[in-house]
Image (cartoon, rainbow, N blue to C red):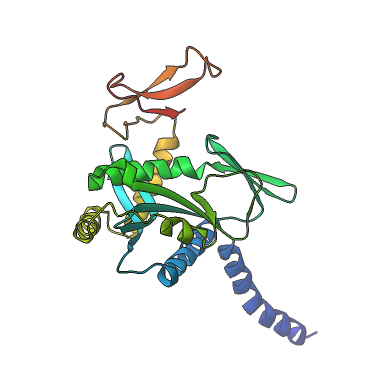
């Protein structure tokens, strides 16, 4: 019996259905969602922020004493430096400024993710060291795209969709000359790692090393080794943490 008349239509459908499903799966991956979120921010900024006032760089990877740090967006302006972290997330978002982890809830599913304010703190410190500017002129900005809803009160620098535009524009007191802005832009362009696949892979390796409790760690501020210590008092007494071996000159600590 010839099954060709039956198999041919099935094979024809599979020929486009399989690639279609692969594309859908890729678009739902964390990497693709991150790329889409960053692209949306670029478009919003292009439409809403004057390019002659707000000089911008995207996907900036900088070397630090303990590896590298990758910054989604940097906006340099006479009114300050705005360091923007993008989150492409849906569902309900729960979190406060001091919590180490925030929560995403989609129907009955719950996910934990790093407090983006803490995540962006390292970015600010790297830029402060690279540009040699007053920390007061560096501003952390978080924007959530993807239709999420905040279910707890968040700081004004945590925004949704194009809300980061209004937050950035709320700063109207000049702190840098235009010449200084141009100089910082040139310094950052020359000091960043090349935006390439190799740079991304090296950054991922650094992240894995930092999450390995057995790996040697370096202080992101002074470059000395981080060592494990135990809290002796307070509500977290008995818990271990990473502390700078340069203490008390350097008081950097990290969660274990």
Residue 49, x across and y down, in percent: 40, 67
Front one among 2 and 183:
183
Q: Name the residue nearer the viewer: 68 or 89.
A: 89
Residue found at the very far top of the displayed protein: 232
The residue at the point 80 percent across, 84 percent down is 1
User: Relative to 118, is 86 above or below?
Assistant: below
Q: Position of residue 116 (x, y in %)?
A: 49, 45
Extreme-front residue of the structure: 173
Q: Position of residue 91 (x, y in %)?
A: 66, 53
Q: Is residue 103 left or right of residue 72?
A: right
Numbered disc total = 0
Vertical placement of 209 versus 11: above or below? Answer: above
Residue 46 lies left or right of residue 184; in this view the side is right
The image shows residue 173 at horizontal and vertical percentages of 33, 53
Q: Nearer the viewer, residue 60 or 183?
A: 183
Left or right: 21 as drawn, with respect to 188? right
On screen, residue 224 versus residue 58, left or right, reads left
Rendered image quadrant of residue 12 = bottom right
Please name the residue shown 34% across and 47% down the image.
Answer: 138
């Amino acid at each position: 019996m010839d099954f060709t008349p039956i198999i041919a239509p099935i094979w024809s459908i599979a020929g486009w259905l399989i690639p279609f499903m692969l594309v859908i799966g890729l678009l739902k991956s964390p990497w693709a969602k991150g790329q889409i979120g960053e692209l949306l921010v670029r478009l919003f900024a292009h439409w809403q922020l004057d390019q002659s006032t707000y000089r911008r760089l995207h996907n900036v990877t900088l070397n630090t004493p303990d590896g590298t740090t990758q910054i989604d967006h940097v906006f340099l302006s006479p009114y300050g430096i705005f360091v923007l972290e993008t989150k492409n997330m849906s569902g309900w978002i729960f979190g406060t400024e001091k919590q180490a982890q925030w929560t995403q809830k989609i129907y009955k599913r719950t996910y934990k993710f790093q407090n983006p304010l803490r995540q962006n703190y390292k970015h600010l410190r790297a830029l402060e060291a690279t540009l040699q500017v007053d920390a007061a002129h560096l501003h952390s900005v978080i924007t959530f795209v993807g239709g999420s809803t905040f279910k707890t009160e968040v700081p004004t620098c945590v925004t949704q969709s194009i809300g980061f535009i209004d937050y950035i524009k709320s700063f109207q007191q000049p702190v840098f000359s235009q010449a200084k802005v141009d100089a910082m832009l040139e310094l950052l362009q020359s000091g960043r790692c090349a935006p390439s696949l190799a740079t991304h892979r090296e950054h991922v390796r650094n992240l894995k090393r930092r999450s390995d409790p057995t790996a040697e760690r370096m202080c992101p501020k002074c470059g000395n080794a981080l060592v494990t210590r135990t809290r002796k008092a307070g509500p977290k007494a008995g818990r271990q943490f990473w502390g700078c071996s340069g203490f008390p000159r350097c008081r950097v600590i990290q969660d274990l």
